[in-house]
Structure formats: structure tokens, C-alpha cells
Amino acid sequence: MKALGFKAIWTLDTEFRASPGERQVPFCLVAHELLSGRVVRIWLADGAAPAAPPFDLGPDSLFVAFFSSAEWGTFLSLGWDLPVHVLDLFVEFKLLTNGAPPPYGVSLLGALRYFGLPTMDAEEKVGMRALAMRGGPFTEAEKNDLITYCEGDVRALDLLFAKMFPRIDMARALIRGRYMKAVARMEFVGVPIDVALLATLVTCWPEIRTELISAAHEKYNVFPNGVFSRACFAEYLQKNDMSWPTTKAGQLELNHAAFKDMSRVYPEVEQLKQTLHSLGKLRVNDLAVGVDGRNRTLLSPFAARTSRNQPSTTKYVFGLAAWLRNLIQPAPGRAIAYLDFEQQEFGIAAVLSDDAAMKEAYASGDPYLAFAKQAKAVPPDATKQSHKKERDRYKNCSLGVQYGMKEHSLARRIEQSPAHARELLDAHRRTYPDYWKWSDAAVDFAMLHGWTETVFGWRQQVGVDANPRSLQNFPAQANGAEMLRLACIFASERGVNVCGPIHDALLIEAADGDIDAAVKTALHAMADASNVILGGFELRADFKVIRWPDRYIDERGEKMWEVVGPLLERLKP
DNA sequence: TCTATATCACCC
DNA sequence: AAACGGGTGATATAGA
């Protein structure tokens, strides 16, 4: 460990209280310096916390923790700086076992058991967690229990670190650790929410539901108790002599796609389709909003096999249906900006495969229309407006290829014959031969060697039963995740308030007068991230700024607001 | 009655 | 045999 060149190596753990949407309330911290043997135990609640941590946070120290965004959240709550170098054993354990889930899970307990290390009694852990959840005030005995428990996890970390150390690629692990700091900052900032609209939506939704249902019930008679009934719908179909597709299990196919298909044959089910769709998803009760009106939740970094974040889809506003993004609104005097990479996966594939035609298509600014031109399906002077339909087909083909889509699904998607879809896919192979050489080789490599990895070493173990389409998609998606992590790191370290990541995008915030500068810094961060991952190739990024009193508007939500908006106006208290 | 599986919703 | 990648989560149904 001395060979690493650090003057101090601290393992550390903190205890705190976490409530939905709120910042952490710190209780205690224990840290162990491995070279000197020094141990620090600090009570952090009741105003007992020091103004700064009692150790050097500079580049000579390494800080080792497990799921350390929690620790850095505690630091931020205390107004402390964050350390320069972080090694996160959760992330490294996740990496070590990626693609072959470990038998006891990826928690600290699971990792300890994986290596045959002694673990704390699970019951004791549950008890201590309950105590932390309950929160203060604590008796002296309870304080002591929490610190002792915290110290137990630090001792466990010491053992885990020793076991894992030989298998850690330190240079890259430190970048991943750096991301865990960025995660803590994003979780700390959160997404500004229009809490008044949220409250109205929550209060009025039951009534809106009732109105939508009773209108549809009059016509179709399929909501007998205020809920959609399959049996009644079957009756409706029979009475009107309508045939309807079924699932493998023999049930009526009731998803949106089926309704969409069938409403072409039976236009009379159109209204029912819309009603069911509107009723489909309004779950805002779990949205984690703090008393300061900000949406904060665990971002679950590195949760996906491709290393993407995977926050809860009910607690994180960007996981909800797109129309609910209208809830995102900067406070008076503030502004937000949404910045996203343009056609990120297409660009990554073009650069990593070094396919000249594909890179040219990306450089054109409209890769999908460029593809259609390269395939000679449209004239060289075609535009988005003049050849909308063709562009849409080539776009769907481009996107589908990334996921390993075949002619059957593509045909369905573009509502053309399988032969037509086949022709598009063939055109892709003809137009981008080097991409296909590279992509096929990547799949072959993964199957032959049993692993695949990104440019920064995010590796996935690959079994013989692996889905080849998943392997085909891995380079684009996983390198995209690497890129966004770097963008988050650069932006947050350069002082931008990053509210959260959205796979290929960032939401940032600043005072109204500072937002343009913040956008500029964030765009630079994204460009730098692209240059690092793609060896000097800069993907373009797009952005939109939203200033109070405006709110985030997602065009996919317009239709829904046409239905919900007026009802809300009429029903709101 | 509880749990596993299927289906569906939504996101990038 | 299937043929769209990575996910979370709610709900309905089947089976132990």
C-alpha cells in the first residue's frame, strides 16, 4: 500500500438519517488510518461536529469506503470539503462481479461473505439501521452503540480492502471514486419542483380519474366498479362482434400497442384507448421531495450492467412519465438548463468503430438524414422537411441497429413490410461496413473470451448463454455511461450545480444571471468528457434553458396536458 | 397466505 | 427457439 504513494490511507464509514427528499442528517463518523493505525471516532449530531474533518483531504490521502456517496453526502451536510482521492469498494466489488451476480448480493455484508470474511450479525445491523432511522435525540448508550457499530463496519472495510486490493485497477478506480463524489453533490443539490402543482395533482387526481372513467364507462361499459374489467371488455367485444388479439397465455392483449393496432380496424375503441392510456400512470405519491421543494433520491450509480445509474422510477422525477416533467420548475430568481449529447450512441459507435461514413454522417449534424443520403434513398439536397418519412425510417433503422433489432420488429415499428425493413438493414450494412466489422468482432470477442469492457475498463463477464444483442449494444451504452460520468465529474468539480443525470443528459441550475455561464461550463465539461472517452472526438451537445417562471416542458406530454390541464383548473381547490 | 412469474407502464 | 439493449416498479394471476 505504501507503493501507492499515499501518506495516509483512511477507511471510513458514517451513520446518518436519510428521509425521502431530504438531505442527510449526520450522526457519527469513524475512520481508521491504515499506515499509522490512528482511529478517529466523532459524534456529528447535536452541533458537536467540527467545522472541518480531522484529517487531511488533500492529494496525499486516500479515502476508502463502501457506497461512499453516502459518506460524501454526510460531508456536504456538514459543510465539509470532499477528499481528492476516493476508492469505493462497492463500485469495485460491483465491477469484479459484473455479469455474474455474487451469491450474497452487492451489499457490504454480501461482499464480506463473498470473500469468506467475518460479518456482523445481520440482526444487529437491522437494529442499528432502525435506530439511525428513528433519529435523535439519542441517549449516551445509543450514541455509543451507533459509534461502535460504525467502527465495526470500518474494521470490516479494512479486511475487505486487503482482500480486494490486488484485483483493483487503481488509476481507473480513482476515477470511479471521483464519480461517487459527483453523485453525492448531485443528490445534495436535487431537482427543483413546483410543489404547488404537485400538491394539486395529488389532491385532484382521484377526481380526474373518476371523470375520465365515467365518461368512458357510458360508452363502453367496461369500468363496472371504477376499474377496468377484462371480463366486461370481453363481453363488449363479443356483443359488437369484434375479434381481438390474445397473449401467449390466451388472455386478451390489452397493452397500448394492441389498442393502437386495433383502433385502426375498429375506430370506435379510440376513446377507450386514450382513456386507458391517460389512466395508465400517475404515481407521484412516491416522488421524493424535501421540505425545500427539491426532488432528491439515491441515483444508484453503477447499478446497471453497463454501469449506468439506475434511480428509482417512482422517486426520481426523470423516471416518471414525460408529461410529469412539467413539475420541474426553478424557484424565483433561478434558472435551470437541460443539456444532452446529440445522438450519443450513434456517435460513440461511429468513432470507436472508426467507420468513415458513419463519422461523416455524425459530423453532418443530422446522422439519420445523412444515412438516407449515403444509402441513396433521398437526393443529396434532401432536408428534414422535404423527406420526413424517409428520414424517420432511416432513423428507426439506425436506432434499432444499436439494439440488435431485426427486420420483423423494424417492419412493425416503421409500419412497412418486412422486405422493406430488410432492405433498410442491408443498407446499413452496406453503408457502414467498418462499423459492422467492429461490432461483429466485439460480439465474437465477448463470446470467445467471456468478457467485454469499455475504454475505461468497465468490464462485464459474459456467459455462453449471453444475448448477442446485449453484447452488440454494450460498447455504445457502457461507453456512453462512462462519458456521462466524466461530464458529471468535470461539471461539478468546476462549480456547476448539477441537479441530476439522465443517462445522456444533465440538468443544471444557477441564479438567473449566472445560468449562461453555467451552461458554458457544463458544455465544456461534456466536450472534455467526450474527448477523453473517444480519444479526441467531440460529440455535440444540445441544451435548453428554463428561467422562472417558466417550467420544464416535454413535448411528449402536450397531449396529456390538454386532457389533464383543464380538469385540473376546474377541480383545484 | 405468501411468493414467483407474467404483463404492463414508463424512462434513456 | 427467438429475433429491441439497459432498467424500476405496480399489479394480476398461478402455484406452493
Image (cartoon, coloured by chain):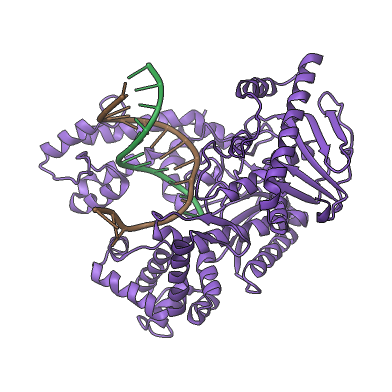
Chain colours: A purple, B green, C brown
User: How many numbered tags mark residues here?
Assistant: 0
Q: Position of residue A354 (x, y in %)?
A: 53, 77
Residue A52 against residue A203 in the figure, above or below? below
Residue nearer the viewer, A120 or A433:
A120
As drawn, which residue projects farthest toward the front?
A116
**Residue A168: percent from the left, percent from the top?**
68, 53
The residue shown at (77%, 29%) is: A151
Q: Quadrant of residue A506?
A: bottom right
On the rendered structure, is A76 left or right of A191? Answer: right
Residue at x-position 38% and y-position 32%: A209
Q: In this view of the protein, which residue sits in the foreground, A135 or A204?
A: A135
Name the foreground residue: A391 vs A503.
Answer: A503
Tell me if I can see residue A68 in this picture: no
* Left or right: residue A139 compared with residue A292: right
Note whether residue A90 is visible: yes
> Is A83 situated left or right of A322 in this image?
right
Give percent across and percent down for residue A96.
59, 50
Residue A504 appears left or right of A158:
left
Q: Given the current orientation, which residue lies at the most extreme bottom position?
A: A380
Reply above or below: A550 against A107: below
- In which quarter of the view is residue A517 placed? bottom right
Q: Position of residue A68 (x, y in %)?
A: 70, 42
- Foreground: A124 or A115? A115
Look at 86% across and 33% down and name the residue there: A40
